[in-house]
Every structure is written in C-alpha cells, then in structure tokens.
Amino acid sequence: MRTYLLLFTGVILCGCMVTPRPLTMQEIEQRTSGDIEAIFAEQEPVTGTVTLYEAMSRAIKYNLDHRLKLMEAALANRQLDVSRYELLPKLVTSAGYTHRNNYSGAYSQSLIDGSQSLVASTSQDRGILSADISMMWNVLDFGVSYARAQQQADHLLISEERRRKVIQNILQDVSDTYWRAVSAEVLLPEMDELLKRAKAALERSGKIAEQRLKPPREALEYERSLLENIRLLWGLIQRLDPAKTELAALMNLRPGTPYQLAETGWETADMPSFKDALESLEHLAMTNRPELREEDYRSRITELEARKAILKMLPGIDINFGYNYDSNDFLYNRDWWNAGVNVSLNIFNLFSGPAAYRAAKAEQETGEVRRLALGMAVLTQVHLAYRRYHIATEEYLVSRKLDDVSHRLKEQTVSVAAAGGADEAEVIRSETNALLAKMRHHLAYSEVRNAAGRIYHSAGADFLPSNAESLDIPSLSQSLKQAFEKWKEEVSGNAS
C-alpha cells in the first residue's frame, strides 16, 4: 500500500511540473502577419486629394490610440453592467444524494445514573435525496453595492472624458502635421531641383579648382558658398520631409501609401479671428476641458467612498427565504418553506470606519485642490495659446512681406547673372534665400493655423458628432467642418 501511495504521489508531482515553452518562429510569424493585417483592416481607401477634415476623419476612425480608448470605454460599460447585478439578492439552489452502507442510529443515556434509556434506533434512510432553493439578501451589502455601482458609472464617464481628450490631441496633431505636409508638398520639389543644381555647380567648381582657372582663395570661397547652400537645403528638407509620413501614421495609412493633399491654394483659406475673445475662451475652457470634468467625476467617486465608510459601520441585516425537500421517509414533512432574519455587526468596523471616512474626506479635499490647480493650468494654457496666435499672426505678415522681397531680389540676381554680372554661386545663394523665405512664409502660415488649433484645444472644443462611429469618411468630414464653423461662431458671438 505504501508503494502504491508513493507511486501515485510521484505521478501527481510529475503532472504538476511546468516546463517553459518559448514561442516558435512559426507562431511569431503568424502573429506578425495577423497584426499587420489587423492594423490596416476595414479602412476606406484614399480616393482623390485629402483635405484637412478628411485627414481628421481618418485619424478619428482608424487611429489606434483612439480605438484603444473606445475599447476602454466599452470595457467600463461592461463593468458597469456587472456591478448592476451585484444589487440583486442571492438566489441559491442545491441538490444532492447521500448513501451509506448501514443505518445511522443512536442510543440515549440517562444523565442520572448513566444507564441506557432507549434501544438503538434510527430516524434516517441509508440513501437520501435532498434539494433546496433559497433567496438571501443582505441590506448592508445592497447599500454598499449600490454606491459601488454609482462609482462604476462615474468611471464610465471618466473613460468617455479621456476619450474626448485623446480625440482633441489627435485633431491638434493632425492639424499641426497637415499644414507642414502641405508646405512639404509644395516646397520639396523646388528644393530637390535647387539641390541638384547646387551639386552640379559644386562638381564644376572642383574641376575649375583642379585646372587652376581661378585663384585658389576665390575658388575655395566659391565652394564654401555652395556647400553652405547645400547644407541649408538639406536642413530644410530634413524639417519638411517627414511631415507626410507622420500624417499618414496619424491617419493609420500603411507606410509608403501615396496620397496627395488638397490645400495647394493654402493661403486662400480664411484666417480665424479671436479678437476680444479671451474671456469667452476662459469660460469655454473651464466648462469643456475633459481634465476638469474628470476631476468632477472623481469628486463624486470619493464622496461615495465616504458614504461606503459610513455604511460599513452599520449592522448587517440578512433576510433569507427558501424551499427545502428531503426524501428521508422518517421525516413527518419531507418538504417545507423557511424564512429568517439575522443581524450581525463587525465590532472592528466601528473602529476602522471613522478612519476610512476621514481618509475619504481627505481624498475629496485633495481632489478639490487638484481641480483648482488644473483650472489654473487650463487658464494659463488659454492665455498662452491666445498670445501665441497673435504673435504667429504678426510673424506670418512679416514672413509674407519677406517672401515677396526675396522673390524680387532673386529675379534681379538672375537678370544680373544673365548679363554676366553675377556668378552661379550667387544665383544659387539668391534662389536658396528666396526658397528659404518661401518656406518660412509657408511655415508661418502653418503656425497660424496650428496656433488657432491650440486655442480650440485649450478651450476643450468638441468637434466629434455623437454618431461618429457610424459615419463614413465624407460624412464625418462634413460634420467636422460644420463643427469647426459652429465653434468659430460661438467664440465670436460670446466675444461680441
């Protein structure tokens, strides 16, 4: 018997041993191909040129950060459904069968002299089938569960506010990247052409230096001028070249997907106006910013936590009601109903409860101070965005004039060079300066648009319609455009 026991124990221990199993390359490859397919699945293809609002629509529908927040909101909603079931009483049913090889029996013994007072007797069958169904409800647990369900509902609303914040950040990033991408689409072909000319001139300059057709110092100065222009051009290209790739990532397009932007006549778009709108923007920000709304919900959660601390100090009242059945033939009544009430109190909760209540109140006060600090930060962001917009507007006006002057200066240099009064390096330098001024003009306009977007962002602007998930890209783009126009009118109307 001992040998069998040891053998059985050894088999059990061997069965409980777990050996690490690394992933195979086939499993990794399968996961990789599946992930790549899932990332870009179920997306409307890009047809035609992409407008700003279409780029925003694609980012909202397909950006993975936003999709993650959607899943988190759905998870919070499911958790709320679960917490609602905790409010219900417990309904428990059980059934069973027991059998023994002999009858159970008992003797009785006299307490006076210790003698046996009865013969052995039994009151139970050898095989018994029993079943019962009972409902139990704890009043205290119901109160705590109700408060917990309210807290879960507030957590759901917090997840919605976090989703709003992600959307606002995505729209701001798309706006910022989109206008840089427009500049890149216009300027990069010109930069590439000028870069080819500068490299060709540098190659010719090297041959001239080798043949000593110019004085060494003059040849070196000429090469240095060309190299400075080439370095400057590469710096401009490095700044603009990633813009379309970054925009494609925000729209969740597969890297390398070709697409064209619609805003080629970029300067024809209306410039937003926020004159005398600062007070209105402050009010909108304090009302709409998702961070402040999240703190409002957190305050309600901590208030409910204080109520839970009070409830836990109260006695628990258990109410039960049920139906029972027993097949024992010796029972006079083999089925019956029962009901009862039980009161219980955890004495230690009377000591820990006040401490838990004070902790909840302290957390609530901390949340209020945190909300005030956030409010101050929000107001500061509004003022900074407002000032940045006006500074960007002034810089844009100067950049536009500088672009015009540089363009006319380039034309004069080209005319002088055609008459033999300027060398190629001077022409390339003039064209590079003109292109630089044009790029700064583009970027200054982009900065004005981005600064306007930061004002909307700092004010907590909500552009997303409630039915965004059911809309296609063109419909969502139109809704976003209308929402932007409505916000501009609201800010202007409140300012006046």
Image (spheres, helix red, strand yellow):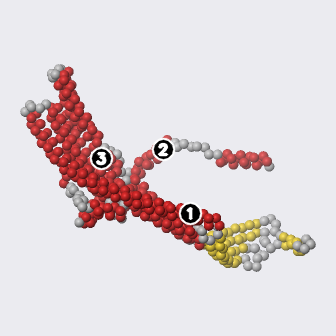
Circle 1 is placed at which residue position? 356
Q: Earlier in the sequence, mark 2 or mark 3?
A: 2
Circle 3 is placed at which residue position? 244
**Which residue is farthest bottom?**
332
Nearer to the camera, 371 or 72: 371
Disc 2 and disc 3: Cα gap in Å? 31 Å
Circle 2 is placed at which residue position? 28
Q: Nearer the viewer, mark 3 or mark 1?
A: 1
Nearer to the camera, 204 or 213: 213
Disc 1 and disc 2: Cα gap in Å? 49 Å
Q: Earlier in the sequence, mark 3 or mark 1?
A: 3
Q: Secondary structure at mark 3?
A: helix
Q: Secondary structure at mark 1?
A: helix
Residue type, label 3 = Lys
Q: Split into 4 quadrants, where in the image is the C terminus? A: bottom left
How many dots with numbers? 3
Nearer to the camera, 487 or 20: 487
Q: Secondary structure at mark 2?
A: helix
Residue type, label 2 = Ile
Q: Is residue 121 visible?
A: yes
Estimate the x, y position of residue 455 in percent, counting from the top left: 30, 57
| Residue 97 placement: quadrant | bottom right
Against 20, residue 391 (above or below) is: below
Q: Earlier in the sequence, mark 1 or mark 2?
A: 2
Q: Nearer the viewer, mark 2 or mark 3?
A: 3
